[in-house]
């Protein structure tokens, strides 16, 4: 078996893994937690604020994963002062771009607790455009600060690395498994440079929301990694 098959398991392998009792049990726990979140009383009227806060917290977590020394409070302050320009230092520039990436993603999620008015539905963003947009936004702070070059933005390090990611998004494995596969693929393979993991995390959130696993859009998956990188690293190593 090639190393590519180990690092990028086929969708059929992903589906088979989901049938394992330990994996199924873990996914059941995640579904239960997300169901509890879905019916949180505070989301009845405060879902917009909750999504804004989730974008800040996910951006902070992903910034830490990418090596920036930052906090949730730092990212919140950056988001509130954002006027589209450059940040003060490399870590802040990266964190600001990651927040923009998360906020634009969350802004496209369906509204909660609203009745349809019969208007035209907004066409979903094509997946290649979504991927490019996630990376473009994530790099925007670095680009404004002169810390990366335009040729690296929204351009994969190797176009063939996008193929497994696109296959995962189209496969009929459980959404949680697809989200995990995307997270691991973009982290291991460095599909983009910099901020490959940010794109994978954004796609993972998009999968969870659009497939109805987290319709609230307020889950913060990256917090697991940021709070305990060693534990997360051990879990992620199981992907290979």
Image (tube, rainbow, N blue to C red):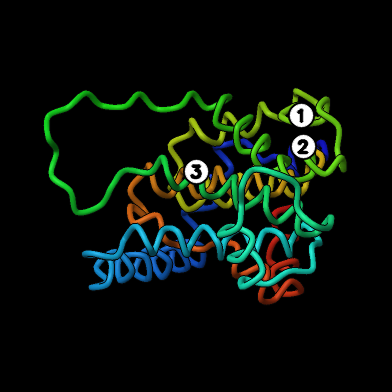
Q: Mark 2 and 3 residues: CB-CB less than 8 Å, in contact?
A: no
The residue at which mark 2 appears reads as 192
Picture coordinates of residue 43, whole percent (x, y): 27, 66
Could you tell which of marks 3 and 1 lies nearer the N-terminus? 3
Q: Mark 3 and 1 residues: CB-CB less than 8 Å, in contact?
A: no
Q: Quadrant of residue 67?
A: bottom right
| Label 1: how many Cα within 10 Å (few below 14, some 14–19, many 20+) | many
Residue, x 79% and y 68% (percent of image)?
Answer: 69
* Comparing labels 3 and 1, the label whose residue is closer to the camera: 3
Picture coordinates of residue 154, whole percent (x, y): 71, 29
Q: Is residue 149 left or right of residue 182?
A: right
Q: Is residue 140 above or below residue 53?
A: above
Residue, x 55% and y 31% (percent of image)?
Answer: 130
Picture coordinates of residue 49, whole percent (x, y): 37, 62
Which of the two residues, 119 or 188, is positioned nearer the viewer here? 119
Q: CA distance from mark 2 to mark 1?
A: 5 Å
The residue at which mark 3 appears reads as 105
Could you tell which of marks 2 and 1 lies nearer the N-terminus? 1
The residue at which mark 1 appears reads as 156
Could you tell which of marks 2 and 3 lies nearer the N-terminus? 3
Residue, x 39% and y 65% (percent of image)?
Answer: 28
Which of the two residues, 52 or 177, is positioned nearer the viewer here? 52
Q: Mark 2 and 1 residues: CB-CB less than 8 Å, in contact?
A: yes
């Amino acid at each position: 078996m090639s190393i590519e098959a180990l690092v990028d398991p086929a969708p059929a392998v992903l589906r088979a893994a989901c049938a394992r009792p330990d994996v199924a049990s873990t996914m059941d726990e995640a579904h239960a937690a997300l169901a509890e979140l879905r019916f949180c009383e505070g989301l009845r009227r405060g879902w917009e604020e909750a999504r804004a806060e989730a974008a800040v917290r996910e951006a902070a977590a992903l910034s830490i994963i990418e090596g920036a020394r930052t906090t949730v409070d730092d990212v919140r302050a950056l988001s509130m002062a954002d006027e589209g320009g450059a940040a003060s230092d490399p870590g802040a520039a990266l964190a600001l771009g990651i927040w923009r990436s998360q906020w634009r993603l969350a802004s496209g999620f369906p509204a909660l607790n609203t009745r349809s008015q019969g208007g035209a539905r907004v066409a979903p963003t094509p997946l290649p455009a979504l991927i490019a947009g996630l990376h473009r936004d994530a790099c925007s702070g670095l680009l404004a600060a002169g810390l990366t070059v335009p040729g690296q933005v929204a351009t994969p390090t190797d176009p063939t690395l996008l193929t497994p990611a696109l296959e995962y998004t189209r496969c009929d494995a459980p959404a949680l498994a697809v989200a995990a596969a995307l997270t691991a693929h973009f982290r291991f393979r460095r599909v983009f440079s910099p901020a490959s993991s940010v794109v994978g995390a954004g796609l993972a959130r998009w999968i969870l929301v659009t497939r109805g696993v987290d319709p609230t859009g307020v889950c913060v998956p990256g917090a697991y990694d940021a709070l305990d990188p060693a534990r997360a690293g051990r879990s992620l190593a199981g992907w290979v």
